[in-house]
Amino acid sequence: MLATLTQNASPISQSTKATHILVVLPKPGKVLDKHQNKLDFLGKDILEILLSRRRMLLGEIGDTPVAANLGSGALCAWVMVDSGKSPFEQQTSVRKAMQLLLEENPAEMHIAIYGNMDEKRAFAELAVYAAWINGSVLPLRKTSEKKSGRKPLARIMLHGYKDAGNFAVQQAKAEGNLLTRELTVLPPNELTPGLYRKYVKKLAASEGWKYQEFDIKALRKMGAGAFVAVAQGSDPEDAAIVHLQRRIKHAPKTVALVGKGICFDTGGHNLKPARYMHGMHEDMNGSAVALGILLAATRANLPVNIDCWLALAQNHISPRAYKQNDVITALNGTTIEIIHTDAEGRMVLADTLTLAAKQKPDVMIDFATLTGSMHVALGSRYSGIFSNREALAQMALAAGKTSGERTWAFPMDADYDAELESKIADVKQCTLEGEMDHIIAARFLSRFVGDISWLHMDLSASSNKGGLGAVGSDVTGFGVAWGIEMLSTGRINE
């Protein structure tokens, strides 16, 4: 549940009753103090004293926001946003300032926007979005209310700018991001494939999406051997491929969103050590991103048809679990030699991509926390992308810059397929070396998309300690804002 928003086009008054206030200022020209003296804003005198005491320049509150108590007793935070910086840098500045206030668990936050009209619009969109996603609280299971941490923000009061559309797109993105993060942090006993399916079915009914699922029995009958190989190690066999469909009259294009939903990943017979198994309840993040984009697109009423495919399973160890040297047959007839059972994500995605491609969407995008080598390549501040269309890759990079969810493109040249050559099957699942596995995995997946325009996102930025961009939690929900940027700006429809 997002905080309610009240807007007031007038500047905030000194007499406004408030406990927590965020003041967002524009970055002036080169002569900072001279320019800023022309701008009157809440708490200006106190800010000047604070900066003098800390020996800080006014321009430094862009990178290092500050906070102090006003004479009324309210806690006020000041941040300066540089319109010349990237959206990611602007988001980071506002989020840091907001965290100074949220540490006190306020029920209400006032946001005061200053600048020219273009600056006010941009700053208001940024600040309201940041307040919504950071003011919400992710699921906790602490029994004591006293120990349960921060309470959710209930109300946001915006001063200095009024949006005629009530920030509908920002709200939609925040709702999608929050859904993604809420699902991702749930403990694995609360989000088994069976429980996940029930949740999605209920959500589909409330949002007006068509719901369809292919359970293990159906997938065996269909010949989806790649998915079944991974799912057969679990008891009960509650895995499934879930298909959600959103249709809009006269929509020009149809986009398929595919998400890896491994609700817990032990590694299978190639068992992960405890250090690397801890946190593997988050291996379903790709499915949560796809679902979050679908929710945000629905709430924002974007004119695009969407098919959302969720590959929901677990990778367990058992007498029935698949193993090294098995040869299985995927849904599209490709035979696969199993090299490592911890490369299960590409297996469940293979058959899910095949199902999605049969519907012949205009564009197909899959999301997955797929490879450790992507973390080695990029760390957790960017996510990597691959595409079989150069134009689509360029659109994805541009959307990353605009949304503040940054992406980086990797090569997908055909000669990488030499690493996947098998002596006994059509293709190897992976290699044992692990080098450039993010590229090898993308090449493997490309065999199951046919001639559809396709983009694969390896979500190395799904979790980043201390937050990322506008998001303050370790689990970032990365991909939702990027996806809405792709869908809402006409990039997909070009």
Image: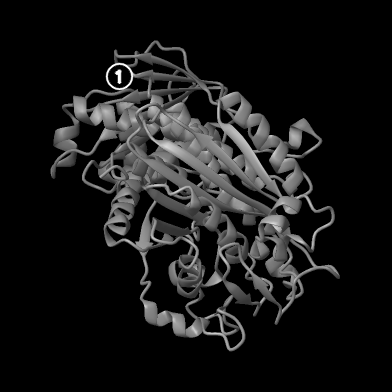
Residue 445, above or below 86: below
Q: What residue is shown at x 51% (from left), y 51% (from top)?
A: 356
Q: Residues within 10 Å of mark 1 (few under 14, many from 20)?
A: some
Q: What residue is shown at x 68% (from left), y 38% (from top)?
A: 139
Q: Nearer the viewer, residue 379 or 46?
A: 379
- Judge whether residue 352 can be spotted in this image: yes
Point out the image quarter for the C terminus.
top left
Residue at the top extreme, as displayed: 15
Please tell me in which quadrant of the rendered image residue 341 appears.
bottom right
Q: What residue is shown at x 23% (from left), y 41% (from top)?
A: 83
Give the x, y percent position of residue 91: 37, 42
Please tell me in which quadrant of the rendered image residue 260 appears.
bottom right
Q: Is residue 198 left or right of residue 345?
A: right
Colouring rule applied to residues: one colour
Residue position marked by numbered label 1 in the rendering: 160
Q: Nearer the viewer, residue 462 or 473?
A: 462
Q: Amino acid at mark 1?
A: Gly
Give the x, y percent position of residue 366: 48, 54
Give the x, y percent position of residue 106: 56, 26
Give the x, y percent position of residue 194: 76, 44
Q: Nearer the viewer, residue 340 or 67?
A: 340
Q: Is residue 86 left or right of residue 373?
A: left
- Judge whether residue 101 can be spotted in this image: no
Residue 452, above or below 108: below
Q: Nearer the viewer, residue 85 or 59?
A: 85
Point out the image quarter for the N terminus.
top right
Q: What element does badge 1 sit on?
A: loop
Q: Is residue 489 left or right of residue 347?
A: left
Residue 148, above or below 112: below
Residue 427, above or below 485: below
Q: What residue is shown at x 13% (from left), y 45% (from top)?
A: 30
